[in-house]
Amino acid sequence: MTFNFYQDPGHGWVKVPNSLIKELGIEKDISCHSYWRKGYIYLEEDSDFGRFCQAMEHKKQITITEQHIKSFHTNRSSKIRNYEIYNKEIN
């Protein structure tokens, strides 16, 4: 299991399937600092990704480590910033 981590000069997001977020039961816990597009949630790195990691450990007994993360960095503003803001009432 590998998750892509996208980072620009100001922030970072981890791409996670929306179905996994729902399976973990944390869809109502994700903040408006995350984004979504085409079946994926781009979890903001500071709090939402932490919630995801805790849920994975608690509910699936999987500890997310650096081995699970593939990093991508851009020196420009990430296109993720143009995706739709995550809305816990819709997603």
Image (cartoon, rainbow, N blue to C red):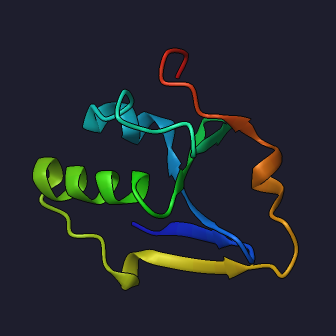
Determine the residue positioned at 39% across, 56% down: 47
Instruction: Please state which of residues 76 and 68 is positioned toward the viewer in this rendering.
Output: 76
The quadrant holding residue 34 is top right
Spot occupied by residue 39 in the image (x, y as percentages of width and height): 61, 35
Q: Is residue 27 above or below residue 52?
A: above
Quarter placement of the N terminus: bottom left
Asked whether, in this view, residue 50 is left or right of residue 14, the answer is left
**Residue 10 vertical position relative to residue 17 in the rendered view, above or below:** below
Q: Residue at x 63, y 42 (%)?
A: 35
Q: Is residue 5 above or below residue 35?
A: below
The reply, left or right, for residue 35 in relation to residue 45 is right
Pick whichever, 75 or 40, lies toward us: 75
Q: Quadrant of residue 5?
A: bottom right
Residue 19 falls in image quadrant: top left
Can you name the residue that lies furthest to the right here? 76
> From the viewer's perspective, is 6 left or right of 2?
right
Residue reaching furthest to the top: 89
Q: Position of residue 23 (x, y in %)?
A: 30, 34
* Vertical comparison of 68 with 23: above or below: below
Q: Which residue does the image show at 50% across and 51% down from the upper left?
A: 16
Total marks placed: 0
Residue in the image at 74% along x and 77% along y? 9
Q: Position of residue 43 (x, y in %)?
A: 51, 52
Q: Nearer the viewer, residue 65 or 81?
A: 81
- Residue farthest to the front? 10
| Residue 18 spot, x, y in % from top left | 49, 37
